[in-house]
Image (spheres, rainbow, N blue to C red):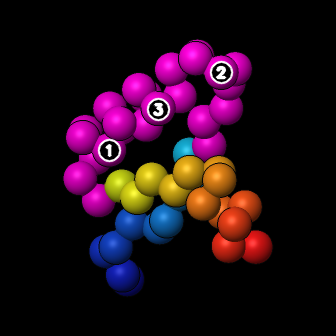
Amino acid sequence: MNNRMKPQVIAIAGVSGGGKTTIAKYLHRKFKNLSVVKKWHIFFVL
């Protein structure tokens, strides 16, 4: 059996100034293999 973890997605939503970036930065520091993709990056790729 493969020991690698399955990819997971954490979506963060909230009002302007609600701390979305703060929590994303915290999670990125805590989990070193975490990738942060911002909504506006996805919007322009599509």
Q: Are marks 3 and 2 in contact (CB under 8 Å)?
A: no
Q: Which residue is mark 1?
A: 28
Residue neighbourhood size for the residue with mark 3, other residues' Cα within 10 Å, grouped as few (<14), some (14–19), many (≥20): some
For the residue pair 4 and 14, the one nearer the viewer reads as 14
Give percent across and percent down for residue 7: 49, 65
Q: What stretch of residues is rendered in magenta?
A: 11-33
Q: Secondary structure at mark 2?
A: loop
Q: Nearer the viewer, mark 2 or mark 1?
A: 2
Name the quadrant containing residue 16. Answer: top right
Q: Is residue 9 above or below residue 23?
A: below
Q: Is residue 42 left or right of residue 9?
A: right
Give percent across and percent down for residue 42: 66, 63
Q: Which residue is mark 2?
A: 16
Q: Which mark is residue 21?
A: 3
Name the quadrant containing residue 30. Answer: top left
Q: Is residue 23 above or below residue 35?
A: above
Q: Is residue 42 magenta?
A: no
Q: Earlier in the sequence, mark 1 or mark 3?
A: 3
